[in-house]
Amino acid sequence: MPQHFDVAPVDATFGAVVTNLKLANLDEPAFRELYATWLEHALLIFPGQFLTREQQIAFARRFGALEFEMAAISNVKSDGTLRREADNDDVVKILKGNMGWHADSTYMPLQAKGAVFSAKVVPSARGETGWADMRAAYDALDAAVRDRVERLSAYHSLHYSQAKAGFQHKDKKSEYSGYGLHDGPVPLRPLVKTHPETGRKSLLIGRHAHNIPGMEPEESERLLDGLVEFACQAPRTYHHSWKPGEAVIWDNRCLLHRAMPWDMTEPRIMWHSRIAGDPASEAAIN
Ligand code: OGA
Ligand code: MN
C-alpha cells in the first residue's frame, strides 16, 4: 500500500486513478513511490491537478530527459479560431492520425519512454483517449503466434501510417512542425519488446509498424493488422473521458494509445510533454 497517495485501479489489465497528492509539489520519497506505481500500472490518471506549463514540464522531467517539453494537441489555431475537419490541413491530419492505435516516436531513432498529458479544454462529448496494454496482449497470445512474433521485427514510419490512413502531408507551408515526418533511415524494431525496468515482454505494434523483413508487404500488413485487432480489446483497453485539469502519465514502452473522434466544431486542447527513451533500450535496431 502506498504511503503518499491513494491508488484505485481502473477496470482493465492496467491503469489506475491516483488521488490525494499534488503533482506540483511531490517530495522525493513520494515521487519514488509514484514511479514504482507507474511501472506497475503503466497508466496513472490524476484528477484535478490544473498544472501550469512550468509545473507540467518540471513533473515530466522527473521521469527523464524530454524529447519535447510541451506540445499542444489541439484543434484551436493560434488566432483562436477552430480547425474544421473539412480544412484537412496538416494539423487536422495529425489529429486524425492520432485516432489510430500507436506508440509515440517509434518512427524516430529513439522510441519515447512515456508522456505526461493533460486536458486544458475538452469537448462536451467524446474526444476520449484510449490506451491498450501490450504486456497483457503478449501474455494472451497463443503459444504458436508468440513463437512466431518473437522472431520478427517491423519498420516504423509516420509517413507510412499517415499515408495508409489517407492523411498524406503535402502542405509545404504547414503550421504543423513536421515532427516525425523525417527522411532519415526508417527505424526497425522487434515485434516483442522487453521492458527495460520491469523485464516484462510486450507487443510493439500499432499503426506505424509495417514491412516485416522476410514477408511480402500484404502478408506483413495482414499479420500486423490482426495483432492490433486482437491486442486492443477488453480487458486490455481503457478509454478515459477527460475533465479539464486532469493529467496522466503513460508508459510508452508497453502501451498503445489513440484519440477518439469528437465534433471538431468544439475546441479540444491537450498538452503533451514527451519523455525520451533510453538509447540502451529504446533505440532502433538498424
Ligand atoms: C499524442 C496522442 C491522443 C489524444 O498526443 O501523442 O496520441 O487523445 N494523443 O489526443
Ligand atoms: Mn500519440
Image: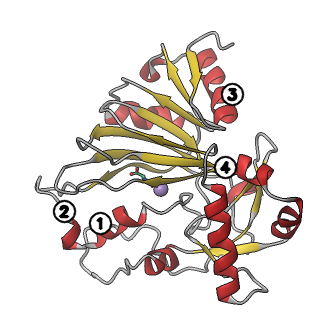
Q: Position of residue 133 (x, y in %)?
A: 64, 47
Which one is earlier in the sequence, the residue at label 2 or at label 1?
2
Question: Which amino acid lies under the numbered mark 2 shown in the image of this protein?
Answer: Arg
- Whether pointer 2 and pointer 1 mark residues with C-beta atoms closer than 8 Å, the reply is yes
Question: Which amino acid lies under the numbered mark 3 shown in the image of this protein?
Answer: Ala
Number of the label disc, if any, that sits on residue 254: 4
Q: Is residue 59 left or right of residue 32?
A: left
Question: Which amino acid lies under the numbered mark 4 shown in the image of this protein?
Answer: Cys
Number of the label disc, if any, that sits on residue 231: none
Q: CA distance from mark 4 to mark 3?
A: 15 Å
Camera-side mark, 3 or 2: 2
Where disc 3 sits, the SS reads helix
**Residue with the mark numbered 3:** 36
Q: CA distance from mark 3 to mark 2?
A: 40 Å
Number of the label disc, if any, that sits on residue 91: 1
Where disc 4 sits, the SS reads loop
Which one is earlier in the sequence, the residue at label 4 or at label 3?
3
Question: Which amino acid lies under the numbered mark 1 shown in the image of this protein?
Answer: Val
